Amino acid sequence: MIGRCPPGQRTELAVLLWERALDPQKGTWSLPGGRLRDDEDLDTSARRQLAEKVDVRELAHLEQLSVFSAPDRVPPPRRIASAYLGLVPLTADPQLPADTDWHPVSALPPMSFDHGTVVDHARTRLAAKLSYTNIAFALAPADFTMSTLREIYCAALGYEVDTTNLQRVLSRRKVITPTGETRAPGRAGGRPAAVYRYTDSGIRVTDEFAALRPPT
Amino acid sequence: MIGRCPPGQRTELAVLLWERALDPQKGTWSLPGGRLRDDEDLDTSARRQLAEKVDVRELAHLEQLSVFSAPDRVPPPRRIASAYLGLVPLTADPQLPADTDWHPVSALPPMSFDHGTVVDHARTRLAAKLSYTNIAFALAPADFTMSTLREIYCAALGYEVDTTNLQRVLSRRKVITPTGETRAPGRAGGRPAAVYRYTDSGIRVTDEFAALRPPT
């Protein structure tokens, strides 16, 4: 699955789904996926399945989410699903096939099989990781104002976050770095806004538990 | 797999392994495991496989670790392994079958297939989770002095941790709670030591990222 915020609209966390044209469960919406090939591992397979739906050059983060293995999760024959969490930046706008679209996770269409549960797991994992890692780098544009970053955190967490607190915590933890540039204020006026970027382009734990830091 | 510290010895992180009596890879050591049955999901299967080796009444925590799916990870036919991290307290001392023993993760015997890689993943995951969750509740006895808890953290992290810092951080985060009792000082003398317990008996994120806390 992919979490991202659809372009040109209110910032929301959205997931890429395709509509089943045939039974079983015709008309319900599914996460991209398919069978593991004999010559590929699960990571390779997840990237391939996704690439067959959309252009994934902008896939900024991909991780194993969880395995869904209830014996009756799909009609026989039994299938075990290894689900992934994939993230693309707010600014990504890949071409989509006709049966495929972004859906806000807050308003999902009728979902196939246990795919709604998979999306719930992904939301929960993402929200938890926002609090102890720099994972939002994968949702943010290359550079951004705190106002934009705040909208991304609000969308992914599902509640309001204070811009000043967010800026202070992320700066103290060296998660974000000022670029030295500013951007003109929006229609609300005020001072020009400082521009930031994420310090790292890979995921890391940002928690400041100094007592447990390895010796340097 | 199970991480724990073997009783009656220096506190160490250890893993439960069994020695293969037959080929393939006769004489190497394996993590407990086996085939998924048609009527069980992976969590149920992991608990069953473990229970067939040892008495797991004291299994304090169990979580999906990662799926190992390289096409050539075992001789054909292909098998995909869904690995679990299971933890038991320092004080647990279950009866073991003749082919099974605890091995310190710092001195593993020759390991079967990719099982050494699985143990490395588990160690890394455990160390990371120590810094942003209360996961050490699953390794600690029901109540303990800070000196005992420090040994558990050192063993799981692989480096020294300061007792005073550890006590301060865990208390501030309300991860541990004083029971109000004290224990006689050890042979080194000094004052009686305060006794603590873990505040929660299930895992939770303990990170103090107030800016991202949901509204109450």
Image (spheres, coloured by chain):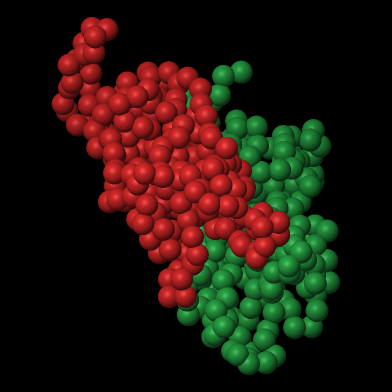
Chain colours: A green, B red
Q: Residue at x 69, y 47 (%)?
A: A137
Give x and y (percent) for residue B113.
62, 48
Give x and y (percent) for residue A97.
80, 79
Give x and y (percent) for residue B194.
22, 22
Q: Is residue B63 above or below residue A179?
A: below
Q: Residue at x 57, y 83 (%)?
A: A77
Q: In terms of depth relative to the viewer, which is nearer, A178 or A113?
A: A113
Q: Is residue B68 visible?
A: yes
Q: Is residue B122 visible?
A: no
Q: Is residue B100 above or below residue B107?
A: below
Q: In terms of depth relative to the viewer, which is nearer, A47 or B6?
A: B6
User: Of all residues shown, which one is farthest toward the top?
Assistant: B189
Classify residue A64 as left or right of residue B105: right
Q: Residue at x 76, y 57 (%)?
A: A59
Classify residue A53 as left or right of residue B190: right
Give x and y (percent) for residue A54.
80, 70
Q: In terms of depth relative to the viewer, which is nearer, B171 or B134?
A: B134
- What is the quadrant of residue B195 in the picture? top left
Q: Is residue B160 above or below residue A79?
A: above
Classify residue A150 as left or right of residue A192: left
Q: Residue at x 26, y 29 (%)?
A: B144
- What is the quadrant of residue A84 in the picture? bottom right
Total label count?
A: 0
